[in-house]
Amino acid sequence: MIRVILTDIEGTTSSISFVHDVLFPYATEHMPGFIRDQQDDPEVSEQLDLLAEQSGTDRGDVEALIETLQSWIREDRKATPLKTLQGLVWEQGYQHGELKGHIYEDAAKYLQQWHDRGLRLYVYSSGSVKAQKLIFGFSSAGDCTPFFSGYFDTRIGGKKEPDAYRNILSELGVEAGTVMFLSDVEAELEAAEAAGMKTAWLIRDSEVPETERFVARNFAEVDALLQKR
């Protein structure tokens, strides 16, 4: 029986276009000023240290660090310092009312229903935990953070690596077969299955390929599967 739902965000609970057409441009526009103003903040400084280490950029050259961040945003680099700093920039945008997190109506509906039915809900996204909490906390459906028991980002491991899902299982202390992972990326589902998790492939708009994997167009179809297990 499924007792835990682990869900991706981009393309699963939320539209890809929101991330790429709203969040990334916002970070691109506001990152330079944020870094210049907040570079001495301990949390920001720690991430700049990591950025310099990972990129080989001179730690003392703030403008070069900013250019590296801008380059990584364009590449959608899955790097912890970038994701953490993006989360800090987005936090200001959400708090100032300039950003509102997108969540599909069906996702918001069933996340609440699953929570109310006693399922434990967790998020696993390449975005930082802070960014995850922001998109759900300041969402178009209101504050959805009470539905979740916890959040995981790339610090637990890469999303296409089976060991990351094994690490999550260890953190949760549950049997792999009681967890269902929801994602729109097949390689992530394969990694979760290698760790023993059940999966659902969210394909909301594009054509469904030939596959033996369970495919859902929305969370209602995921719920129908859950009701059978």
Image: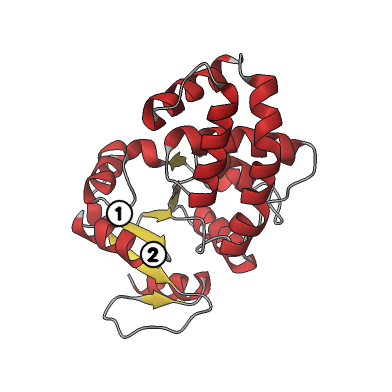
Which corner quadrant holds the C terminus?
bottom left
Task: Tell me the crowding category of disc 2: few under 14, some 14 to 19, or many 20 or more residues within 10 angstroms, Cα based.
Answer: some
Amino acid type of the residue that numbered disc 2 sits on in the rendered structure? Val
**219 w.r.t. 68: above or below:** below
Residue 223 percent coordinates (x, y) = 46, 70
Q: Which mark is residue 160?
A: 1
Residue 113 percent coordinates (x, y) = 55, 60
**52 w.r.t. 70: above or below:** above
Residue 97 percent coordinates (x, y) = 80, 43
Name the residue: 58% across, 32% down: 66
Q: Gap in Å between the C-alphas at discs 2 and 1?
A: 9 Å
97 or 72, which is in the foreground?
72
Camera sees residue 1: no
Which corner quadrant holds the N terminus?
bottom left
What kind of element bears circle 2? Answer: loop
Residue 221 percent coordinates (x, y) = 47, 76
Task: Check the image and name the residue furthest to the right.
Answer: 97
